[in-house]
Amino acid sequence: MNPVRRCSALFSQLCVSSRGGQAARGPFTPTPVTGPAGARCCHPGGRGGKGPTCPQLKPSGAVSTAAAAVCPMGGGSSSSSRLFGTLAQSLNSTQPDPYSEESPNQDLDHELDPDQLLRECEEALQRRPARPHRDLVYPSGTEPSRHKHNPSIRVMQWNILAQALGEGKDGFIRCPLDALNWHERKYLILEEILTYRPDIVCLQEVDHYYDTFLPIMTSLGYHGSFLAKPWSPCLDVEQNNGPDGCALFYHRSRFSLQDTVHLRLSAMMLPTNQVAIVQTLNCQVTGRWLCVAVTHLKARSGWERLRSAQGADLLQSLRSITSRGSGQSEAASGAVPLVVCGDFNAEPSEDVYRRFSSSPLGLSSAYKLLSSDGQTEPAYTTWKIRPSGESCSTLDYIWYTQEALSVESLLDIPTEEQIGPDRLPSYHYPSDHLSLICDVSFREEPHRLI
């Protein structure tokens, strides 16, 4: 029997899954092991145990791929699950205006068990090859935080590829159309999120926010915010699912929301089609404040000056937001620590990258720490083949306030062999961009040491 169709009879059981049972790191408690060149790594593993695993890894409650109920997680199919419908109905009886800055009520009476949902993703994807195996690497000279009063915060940055663009506009000539089928591709996206269990999730090109990501992420304990592009190219595609935009999720067990700002980025005093979400959060473990931003700058060559202007506008807004929203613990430093995630559509050689790296906000790019000198970005964060040719570029970044935050680990970049000759997206990876994962922790403040 088709596993996608098996789910309907069992969905009511999932509605009463365990409450508040999400671990900060999910099913894996990585044990660091010495890696090459003095680096340290841990191995999250792959679907169904495929791919290499570290013999020193000690999984806690390791996930089995035994048969489990499977459910589609988005609209557009007559086999939509009972649970999905229940979640969507409990959030809002009508789909919200995608351009509205207001979020529907996200307080559910129950939370799904993320381990069980991960098993369902694995079951639904049995016919697909496993995702590329990736290690969590501890940069040289850093150690994982084991201080219970200051545990690390896991941040995910990912352009997930809008469904309408993947199927209708982007022209990935080496990717079979059925590899982009939403009724399986959405499982690959969720599997990636569930594997690493980030505390904060920053996404771009989200065009299934209200019918997929908001209900599912809410049921996993996250609070979500979404802002659509004013003129989304998704709307040019027949049978689209609405405009794409940026989404920001934080886990409610770790953070409480202090403020949300939705920005339409400007260039030369004129509004553009790009947006950003900025949220000021309070960490419920440390009592510290953290400002998180997600954005997606203008794409394609020839638009470098526009991207630079958009970056300057965003930096100006961030300076204002982080300086005015200081909590008691940040009073000494005068600003709230900052994490900025995004698809900047800009190589490190572009002016917008230089603007961020030299900003008075004191930002540094986390993924430079994967390099031997700590100063070089990865060779690529996206690799695709279009009719215009092959494109292998670094466009995605996680910026952080270097004086206030410390990077503890990073998810490494798959090799060319792991990605495969047809590049991305593919049967084993749902987007043309790689997800980035960064574990950060608050640095001790001088007044806290007295």
Image: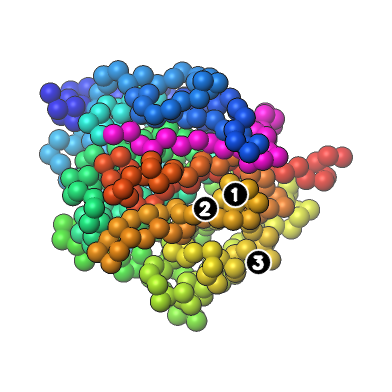
Q: Label 2: which residue? A: 378
Q: Nearer the viewer, mark 2 or mark 3?
A: 2
Residue range of the region highlighted in magenta in the rendering: 129-150
* Secondary structure type for disc 3: loop
Decide which of tag 1 and tag 3 comes sooner along the chain. Answer: 3
Nearer to me, 316 or 419 = 419
Give the SS element for disc 2.
loop
Q: Is residue 157 left or right of residue 375?
A: left
The correct choice, above or below, for 252 with respect to 123 in the image is below
**Label 2 CA crowd tier, 10 Å (few <14, some 14–19, many 20+):** some
* Relative to 150, 31 lies left or right: left
Q: Is residue 86 left or right of residue 345?
A: left
Could you tell me which residue is drawn at 78 percent across and 53 percent down?
A: 332
Question: For mark 1, what is the residue?
Answer: 371
143 drawn magenta = yes
Q: Main secondary structure of the magenta part?
A: loop
Q: Is residue 78 above or below residue 364?
A: above
Q: Quadrant of the C terminus?
A: top right
Q: Residue at x 41, y 69 (%)?
A: 298
| Quadrant assignment, res 126 | top left
Q: Which residue is mark 3?
A: 358
> Residue 45 appears at what percent x and percent y?
44, 28
